[in-house]
Amino acid sequence: MQYQTVLKKMMTELNNEVSYYLDVENDFLNMNQLLDRELEISFEGYQCLCCGKEKKIFRQGFCYECFYDSAAVGDWIMNPELSKAHLDIEDRDLTYEKKVQLKPHVVYLALSSNVKVGVTRKTQVPTRWIDQGASKAIEIVEVPNRYLAGITEVALKEYVADKTVWQKMLKNEVSDADLIEEREKLKAYIPDEAKEYFLENNGKITEINYPVHQYPTKIKTLNLEKTPLYSGKLKGIKGQYLLFEDNTVFNVRNNEGYRVIITIK
C-alpha cells in the first residue's frame, strides 16, 4: 500500500495506549496498526501549510514569508507571556489573536524525561501532553487567557525545567518524581495575578501509555533532506516520533509541510 501526503502532525486519542492517526490526503492512516511493519518514506518536496505553495519549509510547516506574516505563528505562540489580545493590542491579526488567546489556558507539570512546566489551551488537554511524550501530567492553574498562563510559566520555570530532554523521553528514561508534591512546592511562586486560579483540590494525575514495542538505545534522527529515501521496521510511536528497529527516530511534527510517499511493505 502506498500513500502520498503533505505531512502534518499526527492526530491522537487517549486510550489505554495512545491511538495515532496520520492524515494522508482525504483519509486517515491508523499508525498503531503499522507496528512491526516495514515502512518506506520517500521525500518528494515541500508544500507550505499556510499558502499551499511548493516552497521550501522554513519552520513549523510554513515557508519563510508565511512564517513572518501569519498570525498563527506570532511570537506569543512560543512565548505566551507576550500575549496582548486581552489589552486589545494587535500583533498580526487581533481577531485571530483574540480567538486563541482569550480562551481558558492551563499551566501544567508533565513528566516526560524530567519534570517540566508548560502551557496549553484547555481544549488541548491531553493532546499537548501526548505530543510532548509525557508519561504523566497534572494541571496547576486554569486561567482565562494566554497572558496569565504565560507569566505563570515564566515565574515557575525559575524553579523547574520548561524543556523536555527528548532523547531521554524517546529512550523511556523518565525520572520518578511525585507530581503532586512538585505542584505543591510551586504554589508559592505563582504570580499574584494568577494565584486565585490555582486548582486547590486537584490531585488528578493523567497517566499516558504509548504504543511502543521497542525503545531506541542509541538515537539516529531521520533528516529527509539528507536521507530522502528511508526504509525501516516501525517499533513504536511516542510523542510525535516514529521509532524504528534500527534506532532511527522520525519527528513527524518537525517535518510538517514535507511532501512524502509512504509505502507499507
Image: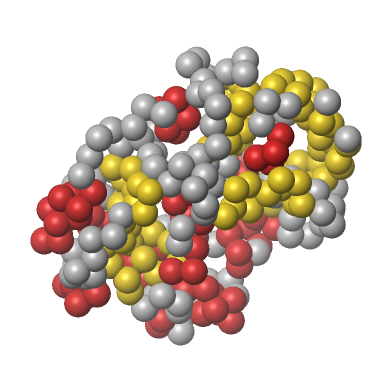
Q: Is residue 73 left or right of residue 234?
A: left
- Residue 96, percent from left and from top: 59, 76
* Number of numbered discs on residues: 0
217 or 68: nearer the viewer: 217
- Residue 78, percent from left and from top: 46, 55
In which quadrant of the rendered image does the C terminus lie?
A: top right
Q: Residue furthest front?
A: 16
Q: Is residue 49 above or below residue 218?
A: below
Residue plotted at (62% across, 33% down): 242
Q: Please indicate, yes or no, whether residue 61 appears anywhere in the rendered image.
A: no
In which quadrant of the rendered image does the N terminus lie?
A: top right
Q: Is residue 65 above or below residue 195?
A: above
Q: Quadrant of residue 206?
A: bottom left
- Residue 146, percent from left and from top: 40, 70
Question: What scheme was used to colour the molecule?
Answer: secondary structure
Q: Please indicate, yes or no, whether residue 175 appears anywhere in the rendered image.
A: yes
Q: Is residue 205 left or right of residue 5?
A: left
Q: Is residue 126 left or right of residue 28?
A: left
Residue plotted at (63% across, 57% down): 68
Q: Is residue 183 above or below residue 224?
A: below
Residue plotted at (48% across, 16% down): 217
Q: Quadrant of residue 213?
A: top right
206 or 76: nearer the viewer: 206
Q: Residue furthest bottom?
A: 88
- Residue 135, percent from left and from top: 39, 42
Q: Is residue 183 left or right of residue 12?
A: left
